[in-house]
Amino acid sequence: MSNVVVLSGAGVSAESGLATFRDSGGLWEGYDVQEVASIRGWNLNKEKVLDFYNMRRKQAAGVRPNKAHKAIAELESKFDVTVVTQNVDDLHEKAGSSSVVHLHGMLKQARSEKDESIIVDIGSNPINPGDKAPDGSQLRPNVVWFGEPVPMMETAAKIVGKADIFIVIGTSLSVYPAASLVSYTRKGIPKFIVDPSTPELYSFDGWTHIRKKGEEGMSELKKQLMNQ
């Protein structure tokens, strides 16, 4: 069974109704991303950061997977599919994808502010000031903030390196280090990018660019792959 690896970004979730900060001038619901998505912002105002992620967690719990998520999950009937996602929601899992690697963490998890290995499942519940991790430190969102290392990058690079078919969807490939994953693909494999605009690829040699939004483009690509 061929290995299909999908690298997904915020554009996939946007079609389910989740806003992306890159579409709104660096703002999420009026918040400056550096104030709510950096360790400096956390140290300056923990309550503000917690409120922001509590809001995002509540929003994510209220949306459903769209046709793009479902098309990716349906590829599992023919392929061994792994999704490597930059998204912190669980819409891929809700759509039925059984193997999902979250590069930037998950909204439904909290972690110790001192030890990133101490992770607590919280579902859609809020994190409040004073909520403690098992080590006694304040719980914070289990989300990788700007300037922080991406713990799953090495794992993701190995997965991409074993792909027989590689699909990029919903990402402009401008956020690093995640965007560097495209360079780990083996030479000569089929590579597809689903995006109505032009992503920031160094070269489009060897790529098939489907210039459509995620739902339409991924549905089209699924039919193509299932019929080959």
Image: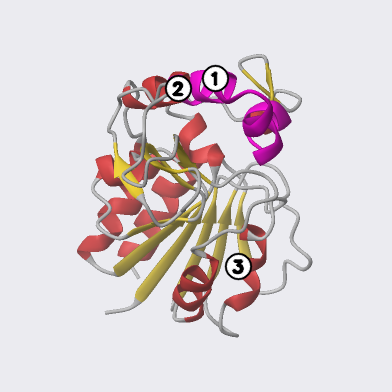
Answer with the quarter of the image where residue 112 lies.
Answer: top left
Residues under labels 2 and 1: Cα distance? 6 Å
Residue tagged 2: 129
Residue tagged 1: 47
Query: Relative to 223, is 201 on the left or the right?
Result: right
Q: Secondary structure at mark 2?
A: loop
As drawn, the label of residue 108 is: none
Residues under labels 3 and 1: Cα distance? 34 Å
Residue found farthest to the bottom = 187
Q: Quadrant of the N terminus?
A: bottom left
**Magenta range:** 33-54
**Do labels 3 and 1 touch, CB within 8 Å?**
no
Q: Is residue 60 above or below residue 201?
A: above
**Do labels 2 and 1 touch, CB within 8 Å?**
yes
Residue tagged 3: 181
Q: Secondary structure at mark 1?
A: helix
Amino acid type at mark 3: Leu
Residue 26 locus on image (x, y percent): 73, 28
Q: In the image shown, does 109 or 9 lie closer to the viewer? A: 109
In magenta stretch: residue 47: yes
Answer with the quarter of the image where residue 165 lies.
Answer: bottom left
Answer yes or no: is residue 213 visible. no
